Amino acid sequence: MAPDVDLAARPPGPGPSGLELVRARVPWAFRWEAGLALIVVIIGIIGTVSSPDFLTSSNLFNLGLSNGEIAIMALPMTLIIISGEIDLSVSSTLGMASCLLGFLWARHWPMIAIFVVIAVVGLAAGALNGLLVTRLGLPSLAVTIGTLTLYAGIALILLGPNTVSNFPSAYTNLGVNAVPGTGGAITYSTLIFAALAVIFGVVLHATPVGRSIFAMGASPEAALFAGIRVKRIKTVLFMVSGLVCAFAGVLYTFRLSTSVSDNGVGLELDVVAIVLVGGISIFGGQGSVPGVVLGVLAFAGIQNALLLTNFNQEASGVVAGGLLLLSVFGRNAASYASRLRAWVPALRRPTEGPADGQAAAGGQP
Amino acid sequence: MTATLLRREPPETPAETSSRRLTERVFRIRESGIVVVLALFVAVTTGVQHRFLSDSNIQFVLVNTTIYALLALGETMVVVSRNVDLSVGSVLGMSAYLSANLFGEHHGIPIPVVFLAGLGIGLGWGLVNGLVVAAGRVPSLVVTLASLYIIRGVDILIVGGGMVTANTLPGSFTGIPKATVVGIPDLAIVVAVVIAAGAYYLRTYRSGRELYAIGSNPEAARLAGIPIGKRVLFAFAVSGAIAGVAGVLWAAQYGTVDSTAGTSYELTVITAVVVGGVAIFGGSGSVVGAALGALLLSTINSALYVLGISDFWDQAIFGFLLLLAITIDRIISVRLTAALRLRSTHRGT
């Protein structure tokens, strides 16, 4: 919970070894993204070899369909986690937007007006998160657990036990049909994800705002002293997240042709899992949008592999949760290795003194 | 979060007893605030609808509170150490199914054995959570978000489409929540004793105080030689074990258990804890406050029902209360820090 304490432990490194010399020559090969790309390729090969259906356009279409919304929501989450915060309310923002859509549609509002309302509500939902986090200095974990409950509660108030499903087919077709001219492989949600990924990628990696986001995640105080408008940028990030999640809710509703109060429950796990699998550090300040795109591919690939086996789909939380833990452990692997060396004398390198054990066991911020 | 760390009050020295008194007084006011809100709520609801204070409704509210209050006890220990346990609802669900299922599989199994089984299941998961957090140096938010879904997933794999129904449970088991002494449910008395014991432990025992120390400043706690890993592991183990026992009680109370038992209980429990005055940043708050928070939430739930308001409003109200509570706590702590700083400058220390 406190990224500034203890957990970011990097014990003093030993002298250069063979591996480290290689690392100095080809640094890109040691990036998280490189390993992830390899895993994605392996999943692709295994999938293609084990099932002839894997690389067909209809399978790709289904993959895009079932992962579209969480992939889209992962993009603003990426920026928020890099900036050192977290937004657990994404799934209930999606659910609230979905219920709002059903609620207003059942009251015969025109669709355009509903979209405007959903945009405003999404922005407001994000603004509430952002203002509580930045202006009151509350931890985003607590705030977004609160709004996770609040927004899901509002969804319940809006629809109660009712279901709205008489949406016009012109809209629900967007949710289940392929984009014309793509051979039936690309869903609208995939297209939206791709477009948003480019936008978020450019903003994060090629603009001053993006550099500021990394800076405030790495050290909030240093960023503040460097004149970065930390509070304003974070508030905007939460608002963007609210807006994107609200429209992910619209997509979700059209895909299932149903608006019901428990839409989206539990999706926050999938979103956080994708982002962390994509190599974003949970402590902020590190990661990349291409990594998250690879994270989406890996996540979707594994889901697909499970679909082909007889795994109970309702229990998919086991896989998402496992992936989440694995990726966090993976990022900590280097520190575990040095702590293990400090514990077990036989593994210790000659350059390391026994005093290293103390530093490794405690860690320096 | 660093900002919070920096603004925290300086460590108290014996010379600053008046500052300590001020701090204690403020936190006592914060806790009695819940009692006042609770009393107001009961008074207003009773004014509108007299049957709210009937014996049967009071019993209903108390029994309803017991499970949340128990879970809040474990959660408080975790939150006080600046961690969070999101997996309590899933642990409760798995324990509820597996323990209730024992009655069907082993006829005539003694009830204490079933409680021990629930305790064991919960303790196991609590240890897993605690080990991963303490040894893996991974934020508890991530670990327990993952284990929330992993445990639920494993539960779904075990239960499948199955369910335990009330008619497979012995009457002496389902009768546990119904037994009363002079109108007060036995269960409420037992839970009150457990909470008192927990409060005594956190207030008085060295290891209990150390949880607060870890929560208010982990780095200082480490330098003071407190075994952080061991204490955090213990807190998670207790939280898990309690969730396990609460699962058995859940089965006794509801009778019908499927794979959805206890879903999203973690949100209610965290709300109860935070509304009860336990700081989500760790380091302050009491078990009694958390239990009062649980009582307040149950009362609100019951009041809405009695007033004829749909219980679909519950969740939104709980979420709003959580946000309100953390906002108030934040304002109090900022004011308190300013007051303490003012005092120390006046005395020239």
Image (cartoon, coloured by chain):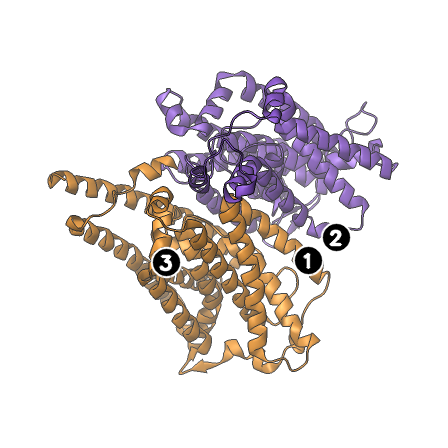
Residue beneath the point at 81% across and 32% down: A45
Give the CA distance from mark 3 to mark 2.
Answer: 43 Å
Task: Output the letter for the chain in purple.
Answer: A
Expressed as whole percent of the image width and height from the top left, the position of residue A259 reads: 65, 45
Q: Would you name the residue on which mark 3 appears?
A: B207
Residue of label 2: A312
Q: Earlier in the sequence, mark 1 or mark 3?
A: 1
Q: Are tags 1 and 2 found on a single chain?
A: no
Q: Residue at x 63, y 22 (%)?
A: A22
Q: Is B299 in front, or is B108?
A: B108
The answer to whether the residue labelled 1 contacts the one labelled 2, judged by CB atoms less than 8 Å apart, is yes
Single out the mark in the foreground, 3 or 2.
3
What amino acid type should be assigned to the residue bearing mark 3? Ser
Res. A58 visible in picture = yes
| Mark 1 and mark 3 residues within 8 Å of each other at the beta carbon | no
Q: Give, as a three-letter code, the residue at label 1.
A: Ile
In this rendering, the answer to whether A3 lies above or below A191 is below
Residue marked by disc 1: B156
Q: Chain of mark 3?
A: B
- SS for dot 1: helix
Residue A148 seen in the current view: no
Image quadrant where residue A183 sits: top right
* Element class at badge 3: helix
Dot 1: chain letter: B
Residue in view at x 54 percent, y 22 percent? A204
| Quadrant the C terminus of chain B occupies | top left
Question: In the figure, the orange chain has which letter?
Answer: B
Q: CA distance from mark 1 to mark 3?
A: 37 Å
Along the horizontal axis of the image, is B34 left or right of A281? left
Circle 2 — which element?
loop
